[in-house]
Amino acid sequence: MKIAFSPCPNDTFVFHAAVHGKIPEAPKLDVTYADIDKTNYWAAEGIGPEIQKISYAALPYVLDEYALIPCGGALGRGCGPLLLTAGGDQSPRSLAGKRVAVPSERSTAYLLFRLWAAEAIPEGLDEIVVMPFHEIMPAVRDGKIDAGLVIHEARFTYQEFDLKMLVDLGEWWEQDTGLPIPLGAIVAHRSLNKEEVTKWVRASVDYAWENPEASIEYIMEHAQELSYEVAKSHIDLYVNSFSQDLGEEGFKAVASLLGRAGAEGLVPEVDLSLLKN
């Protein structure tokens, strides 16, 4: 069976056992390691592997063909995107009529930014520019763009670019909804047996927690020059109880994000009952 997920530590940690034959009920897996922008596109076009890790923001485009697997993905707290500026007026409305860079338009980070901006900047922005992630902070520092949306490790490095945080969008979301942030989802083609896929994905998560040393070599093989300490921090941040089971709170978080984004016209409106079917 073909599967695609990123080489990031949280994904290799979760799927190590299934990939390496540690889960008897799991099929033999043919893995493609791919950035989530690629899997978002593959799933939307129906051209990718039967099982993929995609952004929750991409779910509305694929739910007709792919079912959401209620485990193996990433929801979290304290791990949201940041909106950065070079300083000056740090009020949200200072961005009215300004240009903001984002790394993708099909990401949870982008949806959170647009939902926040609809409330905080009623005058609207001048332009939203899609820019490679690694170019955003230098562009804000150098005045080429007025603000930038950043994710992941940029939470810990933006001060090196002499930038200021205008808003922590994860914190805003959690205060506004009381819910975790839906980040990455595992989806399986609807031709597959969803219950069977769920069973072995969950078993792989459980094995990872019960045998944390077993996956270290595999994680570091794909960790893209990260130190083990950074890789472990990445896992601790993104692999949690929602990775084992979305549960009612997890489903509520996903429904809230996609429902609000659909109402704002940011994604196609979907039948939210499909999240559990």
Image (cartoon, grey):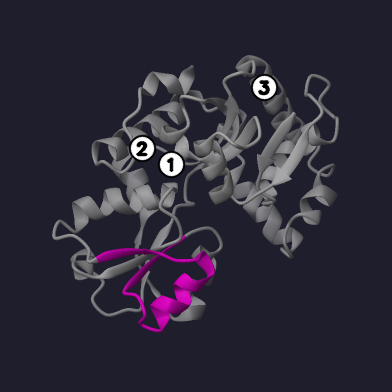
When asked about the image quadrant of residue 203, the answer is top right
Disc 2 target residue:
257
Cα separation between marks 3 and 2: 25 Å
* Front in this rendered view, residue 100 or 200: 100
Image position, residue 73 (x, y; %): 58, 36
Type of residue at label 1? Ala
SS of the residue at dot 1?
helix
Residue at image point 27% right, 52% down? 116
Cα separation between marks 1 and 3: 22 Å
Q: How many numbered dots are placed on residues in this image?
A: 3
Disc 3 target residue:
197
Look at the numbered discs 1 and 3 and tell me whether their residues touch, using CB distance below 8 Å: no
118 left or right, relative to 237: left
Residue at image point 33% right, 35% down? 268
Residue at image point 52% right, 38% down? 45
Q: Which of marks 3 and 2 is nearer the N terminus?
A: 3
Disc 1 target residue:
57
Q: How many other residues sit within 10 Å of disc 2, few (<14), some (14-19) or many (≥20)?
A: many
Which label lies toward us, 3 or 2?
3
Type of residue at label 3? Val
